[in-house]
Amino acid sequence: MILVGFSRNTSKLFPKIFCRKFKHCAPVFKVCDDMYIMLQFVRRGYVAQISVNEHGINLLRAQGWEFINLDNDACNSTANIYDDNMCPDIIMAESCVDLCMTVIGMHAPYIKTPYGLYKKLKRHMAP
């Protein structure tokens, strides 16, 4: 299971100016029953792996994060994404949106902002 989290807060100047509703996004992988790994885009060439439990996900929701739940069928194979040797496409992502789209296997060249990705995933997940 993969969650894509969207936040309204960021410390970067560029998203504060150009992004509308959501300013940051991050993919979250469910590793076991109560354990998650969040890939946090820091800069090109550096993606941090953050270990989060179910309580941490609930705290993020309380802080304003919104999560979209995606099936593994619709996403890339996640077996080697969150190990010590992450694939080069993930490490060389240009932005947090590019990181999320690479992880979930989406090819949408005109989506550049977290809010654009959020709208596209919501449309895709709508019944």
Image (cartoon, grey):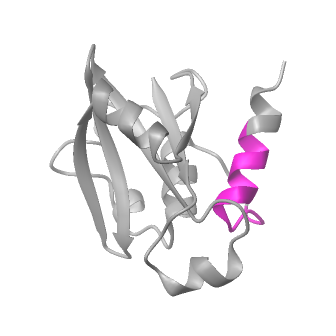
At 46% from the left and 39% from the top, the residue drawn is 62
Q: How many marks?
A: 0
| Side of 85 where 59 appears, left or right | right
State which quarter of the image contains the C terminus. Answer: top right
Pick whichever, 35 or 16, lies toward us: 16
Q: From which residue to which does the magenta span run?
A: 109-121
Horizontal and vertical percent for residue 112? 69, 68
Horizontal and vertical percent for residue 95? 51, 70
Could you say which quadrant of the image residue 22 lies in?
A: bottom right
Could you say which quadrant of the image residue 116 lies in?
A: bottom right
Q: Is residue 1 magenta?
A: no
| Side of 82 where 121 appears, left or right | right
Pick whichever, 10 or 48, lies toward us: 10
Magenta residues: mostly which secondary structure? helix
Horizontal and vertical percent for residue 31? 27, 25
Pick whichever, 80 or 8, lies toward us: 8
| Side of 32 where 15 appears, left or right | right
